[in-house]
Structure formats: C-alpha cells, structure tokens
Amino acid sequence: MNLALTEMRRAKLRFGLLTAAVALLVFLIVFLASLSGALLRAFTGAIESLPADGLVYSETARANAQASRLAPDTVGQVAEVAGVAAAGPMAVLSANAIVAGEPDELQLIGVQPGSPSQPEGLREGRFPEAADEVAIDASDAEVGIGDTVRINGTSTDLTVVGRMVGTQFGTDTAWVPITGYEAVLRELNPALPAVPINVVAFTVDEGADAAEVAAQVQQAVEGTQALDRAAAVEAIPGVESVGQTFGLLVGITFVIGVVVVGFFFLILTVQKLRSFTLLRATGASTGSLAGSVVTQITAVVLLASAIATALAWFALQALSTGLPVRIDPLTTGGVVAAVLLASLVAGLLSVRRIAQLDPATAAGAR
C-alpha cells in the first residue's frame, strides 16, 4: 500500500494523464448509455408506467396503439375472461395544443381513473378525476399546477392538476379521464357516432401468468391481439430499431473502452517490470507486489469513474434534447465494475510473470 501510494505521489503527471484518459473513456460509455435509456423511455414510458399486466389491441394494429381501434364494450369483454382481475380503456390522440400559453405537440391519452390504464409516476399534485382536468408529462414546457391545456380546434380549457414523470409516449403527454377524452374528440368531430378506444389494459389474478392470460383474452375476444406488458413494450414501433442502434454503439464503445483501459495498465505494469524484479530479489513477496498493482489500479479507476460520472451529469444537464435524461446507477456501476475488472486482469498479467521468477536469479533478469 505504501509503495503504491508513494509511487503515485512521485509520478503525478503519469498517473494524472492515465486517470484523465480512463475518465474520458468511462464518460463516453456512461453518456451514451444514459442518452439511449432516455430515448427509449420516451418511446415506452406510457406503457411501462401502467400498473397493467397486459394490453389488448385490434388484431390488425400490430401492437401499435395509435393504429388500433376497439369498441368501448371491449373493456367489459376482456374483464369477463378467466384470469383477468380488472380492465380499463386507453385512448390516444395526437394533437397540437396550447400548453401554459405556449404551442406544443401532445399525445392526449384518455384512461379510466383507478383502473389498470391509469399510469403511475405522479410527480406533483394528483391524477385528474373530472372531465376538464389533466395531468401532464412535459419535459421542455414550463407547466405548473393550475396552468391550462387547450387542444387546437376546441374551446375547452383543461386545468393541470398533476405533473407526471416517465409517462411520455414519444412526445409530451397529457393524461385525462376517458370522459374528458370523449368530450375533446366529440368537439373535434361532432358527427362522430361513437368514440373508439385504442387499447384495453388489464391486470391478472394473483399467481396467474400474464402471457397465458393474454393468450386466453386473444382467443376469447374476437378481432383482438393481446400481449403481456413486456411484449407490448418491445412491440412499440421504433423501439427495437432504436434499442439495437444504441445498444450497438454502447456495446462497441464499452468493449473499446475496456480493452484500451486494460492495455493502459498492462503497459504501465510492464514498464515497472525491472523495478518489480529487483524488489522480488530483495525479498518482496509476490503478494505485496500484486497488492501494489491492485491498489494503484483501483485508485485510478475509481477516481476516474467519479470524474466521468460528474462530467456526464453536467453534460446531460446542459443537453437540450427535450428528454428526461438521467444517469442510471446500475448501468454506471456495471460499467465501472467491468472497467476495473479488465484493468486488474491486465495489470496482474505482468505480476504473474514476476511471480514465476526465481528470487536468487532475479537480480540479473532483464
């Protein structure tokens, strides 16, 4: 320990540059992973935030909520299927609106309060109950409790009573009771004979398998496609391609970062091979030399990771994406652990060579 820290104090420039290089690599990995996670959450938040175990679409929609059209009585049909505990409607409308006095593009989603279609993720206030109330998830817009939302083409102001987080459906999203959704749609289309819904969200009985119940629903309710929630999230248009693209970028960056960091420490240890050989000849144990390498590697990687995380946080705060970007502790921890492990393996490869030397002849080794 003393040997390792003494060397680090005497070679501040070398270890400083090494720490900076590792920090930049870890920063790049954390930044890309955080950005990809935020983009995927913007696509899937409205579905992932539901307490539902499964969702039902029209069979021709290919699990696309906006393309799905279901009769309102489908909710009752789904609720009657064996294994279904509760069901609730979900209706989606893409619209331009005036939010807190500013123009915005919204997904207006009507749900039944207290049913499986009511999302979780309330950040402030309460979920709307009256037809003229709304809860909003807006990343860019400055919206507060008491502000109003007006869908273009209507004359009704919806009062913001709650603010949501993590419930977006591709863009800023406003949640209203299904009665409020119907009122908006009828005002936009006075001749509409009936207001369709897009999706039915359902929960299953305790102990029941969501995928099996979904299959039963699809068989029992004609003209529908039913999926468990995980499958519904994966089926959202664009999610698979975005996930694969960013996954490839993050994966390649991760592999390159780990390999480069590993070689950094391998080269550093090889450069000290002569010093380690002399120490071995004067009686230093292999364990003490290995401990010195482990201490230095751990100190550099942890310090670099702390710097990288701070840089990533500041960079994401300054990034104007309109997305709620945040650093995932689990992802960051996994990146740091992998980089540390690769670095230790690379550094200890040289120590293994030293351990194989005969102390009696080590002094003459080159």
Image: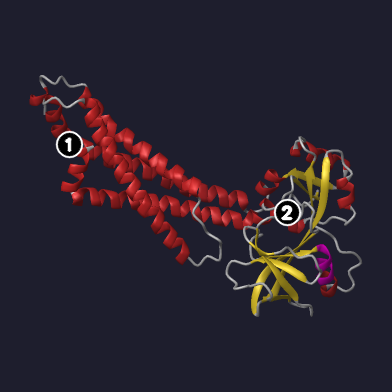
Q: Callout 2: helix, strand or loop?
A: loop
- Is residue 240 in sight in this rendering? yes
Q: Which mark is residue 287?
A: none
337 relative to 229 in the view: left or right: left
Which amino acid, mark 2? Asn
- Residue 97, given in percent of the width and then of the height, sits at 70, 74
Q: Which mark is residue 272?
A: 1
Front: mark 2 or 1? 1
Q: Which residues are magenta?
A: 178-184
Q: Nearer the viewer, residue 8 or 2?
A: 2
Quadrant in the rendering for residue 299: top left
- Residue 154, given in percent of the width and then of the height, sits at 79, 78
364 relative to 219 in the view: left or right: left
Which amino acid, mark 1? Lys
Q: How is the image coloured?
A: secondary structure
Above or below for 191 versus 245: below
Task: Name the residue tied to disc 2.
Answer: 64
